[in-house]
Amino acid sequence: MKICIVGAGAIGGLMAVKFAEAGNDVTVIDQGAHLNAIRENGLKLIWEDGSEHVAKVRAVTTAEEAGKQDLVVLAVKAHFLDQVARDIEHMLGEETMILTVQNGIPWWYFQRLGGKFDGSRLRTLDPSGLLTRHMPAHRLVGCVVYPAAGVTEPGIIKHVEGDRFPVGELDGSTTERIQKLHDLFVDSGLKSRILDDIRSEIWLKAWGNLSFNPISALTHGTLVDICQFPETRELAADMMAEAQTIAEKLGVTFRHTIEKRIAGAEGVGAHKTSMLQDVEAGRSLETEALVGAILEIGEITHTQAPSIKAVYALIKMLNKIIMSEHVGVKLTEAA
């Protein structure tokens, strides 16, 4: 299969190496020192057992250079998707799939959903409709990412734990292409299953993202720190309970309890969430996909979420400070 990974960071890089090792034609789009290292030395993945895997993938800077693909994997943070969308047509053939692997609630959540909210647009994630226009729903396939990994230095990805990538069509159907995508993951040594309700799985993962990520960014605590400190554990549970109430109004079912979800995070250990890694690196934060979009859905479903709202205000302020320092402008001028 001809595959382009847009963003060869922690998860995108992991996928790129695994797909290439399985014999697929893999191209990555990235920039800067990371791109240069991949071009010079290949992309290295260090698995949790210490084994090293190096893939010689094609590394480019633009969609036009990448050319037409069978599968495009969007592995950049949600707030960078608008940059990708503008040029993505260079990679799209008649049957090209677009696989989304972002954390949090996806911009396409209400597309092909059915029911009273079908086709609604989440303005926190797609304010101008750019994503919806350039990446039509019939091309999209959902995926939930469970592995934890990080970029330790340019060109090198360190896997921490996990290997599951469940996938699903937006309308819940079982199609030939979703089977092909499932097989791609399995043939690459990863775990996958085809879901007839990808949104419930998205909420299960978002449950942790909406709480652990911002709390860790604000406190600099790891997952085990947050889960073993009574006050932050309680705050995470309160946020998750509010999110569950919102999701259940959309017909979402949760196959785990809040306590089981927290225990799972605690079991990961001293892992820094992606948002904490971004804070430490001075990068912009995924405030809207992880927290803001859930508040917007709460407004749509007329559901109060005071704990989420309070943490959202704090993390949004932190993001504003980070960005003002990064671009060297006054706080009041930062986006």
Image: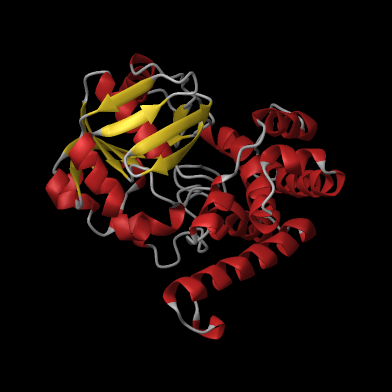
Residue 328 falls left or right of residue 202:
left
The quadrant of the rendering that contains the N terminus is: top left
At a point 49% along the width and 48% down the height, the residue shown is: 106
Front residue of 126/80: it is: 80
What is the number of callouts on the image?
0
Residue 306: percent from the left, percent from the top?
A: 78, 60
Hey, which residue is sitting farthest right in the picture? 230
Which of the 4 image quarters holds residue 183?
A: top left
At a point 50% along the width and 42% down the height, the residue shown is: 113
At a point 44% along the width and 58% down the height, the residue shown is: 79
**Figure check: 41 above or below 322:** above
Front residue of 187/229: it is: 229
Residue 215 is at least partly visible in this image: yes
At a point 50% along the width and 76% down the height, the residue shown is: 324
Residue 270: percent from the left, percent from the top?
A: 66, 36
Residue 169: percent from the left, percent from the top?
A: 42, 32
Residue 244 falls left or right of residue 287:
right
**Figure check: 317 above or below 17:** below
Residue 69: percent from the left, percent from the top?
A: 19, 37
**Which colour assignment does the render follow?**
secondary structure
Residue 31 is at least partly visible in this image: no
